[in-house]
Image: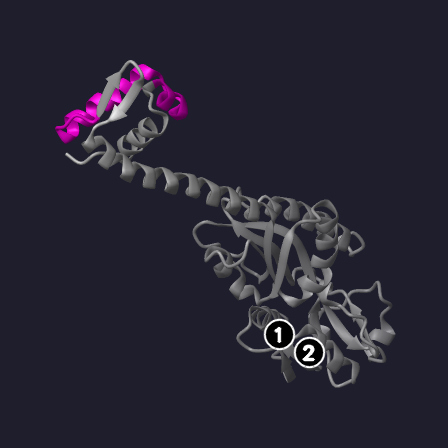
Amino acid sequence: MLLEPAQLRLLALIERHRSLSAAATALGVTPAAVTQQVARAERDCGAALVRRGPRGATLTAAGALLAAHGQVIDQHTRQAAEDLAALLGELSLRLRIGAFQAAALHLLPPALTALRHRHPDADLSVVDITSERGMPAVAAGDLDLAVIASWDEPPAPPEHVRVHPLLTDPMVVVLPDDHPLAVAHPPDVALRLDQLRDEAWVTILAGHAARAQFDRAAAAAGFAPRVRFQTASYDVAQALVGTGIGVALVSRLALTDTPGTTHRQLTPHGLHRRLSAATRTDSSLTPLVAAFLRLLDDVARDATAGWPAG
């Protein structure tokens, strides 16, 4: 019968300490337990392994041969413990974050600043990603946390990924500041989407979830939008509106106060995107994830504190 690694390691300890009781102390067991383990090892291999005498214990030739293998196991065991301790130390300071542009601009900076004050030794990295890539990157272990956006349907996390809601980001209409509707309606007066049925639109690219939400809302308001420009960026959309060539729906968080533009809330309320943070279900090895989530919640509350209700 093959000896177990623990039996080989025991023989290496006996050879090192030349005592069954000292080997027992090293293993954290009783001398009687070591005696039983030696007897079992001798039965398993069919040969005497340890000689007991008044000056302690020595190994037979067979025992010494096996102890050499036990020394290798012992070395690997110690190295594994040291490597694990080093890894856990690195993980305890590591935080790899992914976020889409608006979140990276408006949510991450204050949260990262607060985290660095509390954990100055933190090993932080941030990557600009699309929301569609966020949860797969967390699931694959490439990111510890991803800030993502979703429209209409809440995000469906893959296995071993958890979604933490952060805020609801309402859509607003951005108009040229000399637009008749902007002139006729003060900033605190909301517009209906059907009031914009005859406008030229700057929209998010077809195929994106934000564009699908807008198309459905326009259809429900009784019109097919006349799309003049398409872009993947709310910043670009607002810059184009500033030239006077059209209007756009933009999330409240992404508003930039672009020169030549103004914005109005929409009524009835309902068009919005959800901002969430995706993490591994078990983040116990990366404790900065929980700390950063708490900071993101604080920043999200501060960011939405002045937004109109609804």
Q: Quadrant of residue 52?
A: top left
Residue 132 screen position, x and y as percent? 53, 65
Which residue, as the protein is rendered here, is positioned at the far left?
A: 46
Residue 79 screen position, x and y as percent? 43, 43
Q: Is residue 96 above or below residue 203?
A: above
Q: Residue at x 67, y 53 (%)?
A: 167
| Residue 39 drawn in magenta | yes
Label 2 Cα neighbours within 10 Å, binned few <14 / some 14-19 / many ≥20:
some
Q: Quick one: 34 or 109, which is closer to the camera? A: 34
Q: Residue at x 70, y 78 (%)?
A: 236
Contact (Cβ within 8 Å) of mark 1 with mark 2? yes
By secondary structure, the bulk of the magenta-drawn segment is best described as helix
Secondary structure under tag 2 reads loop
Magenta span: 21-49
- Compared across the picture, whether 297 is left or right of 162 comes to right
Residue 99 screen position, x and y as percent? 62, 62
Q: Is residue 309 visible?
A: no
Amino acid tagged 1: Gly
Decide which of tag 1 and tag 2 comes sooner along the chain: 2
Secondary structure under tag 1 reads loop
Label 1 Cα neighbours within 10 Å, binned few <14 / some 14-19 / many ≥20:
few
Quadrant position of the C terminus in the picture: bottom right
- Compared across the picture, whether 273 is left or right of 172 comes to left
Q: Is residue 36 above or below residue 64?
A: above
Q: Circle 2 sits on which residue?
A: 197
Q: Circle 1 sits on which residue?
A: 222
